[in-house]
Every structure is written in structure tokens, then in C-alpha cells.
Image: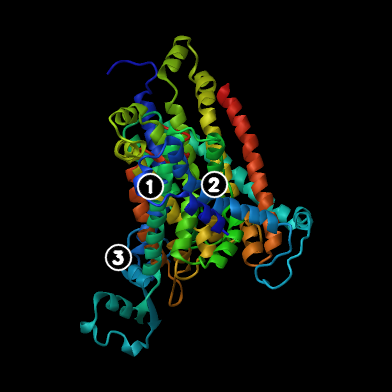
Amino acid sequence: MLQPFIDKLVQKTPSSVSSRVRGLSDKKLAWLFVGPTILLLLAINIFPLIWTIYLSFTNYRVNRPNRDVKWVDLRNYERILTDSDIWQTMQATAHFLISTIVLQVVIGFTLAFLINKKFKGNDLLTTLIVLPMMLSPAVVGNFWTFLYQPQIGLFNYVISFFSGIDPSSFSMIGDVHLAPWAIVIVDTWMWTPFVMLICLAGLRSIPDSIYEAAECDRASQWRQFWTITVPMVLPFLMLAVLFRGIENFKMFDLVVQLTGGGPGSLTTLSSIDLKREAFEKWKTGYSSAYAVILFVTVFGLASIYVKALNKVKDR
Amino acid sequence: MSYSVTAPSSRTKLFSGLVVSLYALITLAPLLWIIATGFKSGQDSIHYPPKVLFEPTLEGYVNLFTTRTRIPSDQVAKEPASMSWYEEIVNKKGEMIAGPSKYGERFLNSTVIGFGSTALCMLLGTMAAYAFSRFKVPLKDDLLFFILSTRMMPPIAVAIPIFLMFKNLGLNDTYLGMIMLYTAVNLSLSVWLLKGFMDEIPVEYEEAALIDGYTRFEAFLKVVLPQAITGIASTAIFCLIFAWNEYAFAVLLTSGDAQTAPPFIPTIIGVSGKDWPAVAAGATLFLVPVMVFTVLLRKHLLRGITFGAVRK
């Protein structure tokens, strides 16, 4: 597969590389420096993507390698787009995406706003708050199932301590009404600091002189907040939402470990569903089409969003 | 202190400090709970109400590194004198050590793959970033965007053909395969971050070196690299953390020899059912290094998580 690339590379590379690299012109050096990166990305990202697109038009199955591979045109795509289960998965993904983004923006912005009041020890607290987002989602997600245990779990205990509800009477992961929120809570716990950090950078980028001018004009605090703070932080906030949106659209590790997609298929997000089709049911062609649809969706949504973001930035 | 109309009053500061402290307390509770559970005995870990104060024991850590079997009750503590401290802990619970667990191996795999891919990623990333920062590369913006866009793909979407490709090449469940894969995944981050760091180094230094008779390559090695070293170090830590935490590819493409810790830790079980202290002990050993790195990284954190889009 990679042989033609490697052959070409061998041909083009001079015999005494080390002595000649020193004397290379800028142009040759540029290619020598960028080449390996591009080659690796082509081999491990683009080549697989093209292969996925090819497979999506076939009925290939990994677990039946000897069966004839048939070209099935758009049938895989047709089946996916008319499958009601997949629409339910999409709804679960949308619920997860929207709830996490709203919660993280509200809490993250509030925290950043408070931290920006520059009280003593704000640096230390910021560093501590940031910790969860740097940790392995699979490992942490797995431990949260322990915190969510009815009766013995810390989460249930704290809830019952403040509300008086019996801690063994509800199961965050097992209950059909609570499970979609169980994953939202953990994701919010993990990623609010991300939004907070970006908002904080936005708040700190606003020069004091603007507020001083507003003060001279006797603009109220409330008015200053809505006419200075919010518009100036908005591009930063939108960037944070873009990152969280893309990441949560791909969400797999945390939720797989937390609920495994259950109860039923209530928290089966797109990536989890895709993994089942591809690596448990081994419907390779079908799941390739599924993958292409997801990729096109996230890429399309992200492009539209970036356009809007640039408009806000230029304003 | 000079008087400023915009400085928050001390009452505002106090209120903000209290609210943020409260949030920090809530958000750190699960992490502290992981660390605490690692030092609890099996009974204390599932006690109701949850125990904040408990007698610490290394039972979880011993269980983490061993596999054990039950022994008949009459054999319990027969000859405690000849036992080492960890055998004693296990014996008290009516079990005996059958052998080492896989945790050590999995942790080592994570280390090898993490550091291996980070080293390769830094080598390729530094070169590419320098070229993008200093030279006229044709289609520069397109190439840079292409590099970034590789990050948008859901891992599962490319996992199918990578699985097939690795199977054909014999790379499934090998160090080499995982190192190459994680390098490719992290290249987008390292190229973008490093390009930003290199853009900040004034070109004048190199120009002076070139006039002094250095070749371009020598100037890169002897002038630019030493100046970019903080940037390279913090980028490397980011790559290491991402490779360390990765789960989706690891669970799909590795099962034995090259399996890393994240898919393994959730599967830890004791002699009878889920052994939460052992899971917590495994998680603690796995998470604490990242916490330490995060504290070291705090100045570059924002830049790293936004691919260099936001700089402070």
C-alpha cells in the first residue's frame, strides 16, 4: 500500500543525507520538513477515510472475508436515513450536545466572571478547577458509576442529604428519566473548566480603559455588562462552543464507560451506535456509510458555525 | 494603591472568592473520593453512609497488582510469621495471592506508547511547524487546515479501515501500530501549537546567524530550537496527556500485548465482584501524574486546549 510512496522517497533521498541536508536550499528543506507529517497523515487519516467512503458503497463484512464484495450503490445510505432507531440515536446525541453546551456556557461564564474579580488566590483555584478536564474520560467515567450507585454512592448520598430523598430510591444510570442527565452531569463536571478558561481569556482581553470611559458616561453596571462585557467575550465563547460541539459530537469514551448506552438505547449516542454496528455486528459496509454521514454532518455544521464566528469577530 | 473606578470592591471580591471556592470544592470531591477509596478496605468502600473518615489500608493497592484465590478458613493466618506484609493483608481476608495482575504491564504499555508517540510527534511536528512558520510552502493555508481537519473525524469513523489496514500489515495490538496512530492523531495539535510558538521567535536571530555563515539547517538547530524549548516542552506534555488518556482506538485496536491502561482499569474485578478500592487505586496511580503535569502546564494550558487559537 505504502510501497510507491516509500520507493519514491528512497529514490529522491540522496545517499549521504546527513552531509547534504546542511546545504539544502530553503525550498528543499521546507519539503523535507513538511513531507513526513503530510505522508503520515495521508497514510493514517486520509487513506482510511477514502477507504471508508469506498466501503460505504459495498456490502463488505469483516467477519466474512471470503464472501464476494458487492457494489450496492446508495443502499447503505438509504437504509440508514430511513432507520427510525438511528434517528432516535441522533436525538439522544442532540439532547446531550445542547444540554451540555448550555450548562457549560452558563456555569463556565459565571465562574470566569467571578474569577476575573481578581480575589486573592484566584490563580490557585483556577488551576484546581481545571484538573478534571485533563484526566482520562474512560477512567473517570468508570469511577462515576460508583458515585452514582444507589444507597452507597457519594452522589446519591449528597442528593439525599440536601433533599431528603431516600438515596436508594433512585438510580442515575438505571432510570430512563435520569440516565440522559447522568451523562450530561459528568460531562459538565469535566468540561466546564474548558469553557471557563476561554471565557477568562476573553474577559482579560478587555482593556480597563473601556470600562473607565463607560464609568465617566455614567453607564450602569448592568448596562456595562450587556454593552461591553458580553459582546467582547462573545467571540471567545463561540470558539469554546465550537470546540465542545465537535468534541461532544464524537463523544464515546466517557458515555460508554458510564452507561454503556443504556438503559435500553436511551444514552446510545451516535459514536456508540456506530461502534456497535461496526465492531459488534460487523456490518462493515453499512457502518462505513454511517461514519461518512456523521463526518459530513459534523464537518458541515462546523463550517457553517465558523462562518458565523468570523462574522462576529469582524464586527 | 491608586484609586481606580473599575477595581472590584472588597465585598465583591469576598463574594466571588466564596462562590468559586465552593465550586472548586464540589468539582474536586469526585477526584478526592477516587484517591480516598483507593486506601479503603472493601467494606469501608461500600459503607452506608459513605465514610469520610476511615482506617487507611493498602488492600486496594495489593489487590490491584495481584490476582488472588479464596482459601479454606482453617488455613487463614496459619503461619503469619513467614508472610510479607502484602501476603498478610490478603490472608486476613481469606484469600491467597495467585500471581501478579496485568496492571503493571498495562501501565508500562501506556508509558511506552505515550512517550514513544510523543517523541515521534515532536520530531515531525517541530520540523513541519518550522517550515510552516518560516518558509513559503505552496498551499500553506490549505495544508494547515487539512492538518487541523484530521482532528474533526470521530475516531470510530476511521477505526474501521485502520483496523483492516493494521490487520493486513500485522500492526494490530502492537507498540509500533499504536505509536504511529497516536502520532498521527496528535500531529494536528503539535503542528498548530508549535507554529504559534515559532512565529513568536523573531526572525532577526536567524538572519543574523545566516549572515555569520550558518546554513539554514544549522540556524534551525542552533538558534531556533533552543529558543522554542519551552514551547516544545509544553506541547510535548499535551501530546503525552492526550495519548495517555486515549480510549476509543485503544479499546478497538488492542486487546492483549499492547493494551493501554484506560481500557484495562474499568475491567478490574476482585475475587467476588467489582473491587472498587482496587479500581480506585489503579485510577489514582494513572491520574495523579496527569494532575502534576497539569499544574506544571498551567501557564500554557489555554493555548494547548484551543490549538493555539487563544493565547494569553
Q: Earlier in the sequence, mark 3 or mark 1?
A: 3
Q: CA distance from mark 2 to mark 1?
A: 17 Å
Which quadrant of the figure contains the N terminus of chain A? bottom right
Question: Which comes sooner in the sequence, label 2 or label 1?
Answer: 2
Q: Position of residue A96 (x, y in %)?
A: 61, 48
Residue on which disc 1 sits? B236
Q: Judge depth for marks 3 and 1 and give the one in front.
A: 1
User: What type is the residue that disc 2 sits on?
Assistant: Arg
Q: Secondary structure at mark 3?
A: loop
Measure the C-alpha gap from mark 2 to mark 3.
46 Å
Can the viewer see residue A137 in this picture? Answer: no
The reply to whether callout 3 and callout 1 are in contact (CB within 8 Å) is: no
First along the sequence among labels 2 and 3: 3
Question: Helix or strand or loop: what does disc 2 sit on?
Answer: loop
- Tell me the kind of residue under disc 1: Ala
Q: Position of residue B214 (x, y in %)?
A: 30, 34
Q: Which mark is drawn over residue A253? A: none
- Which residue, as the protein is rendered here, is positioned at the far top? A217
Chain assignment, label 2: B
C-alpha span from label 3 to label 1: 40 Å
Q: Which residue is mark 3?
A: B55
B90 sits left or right of A282 in the view: left
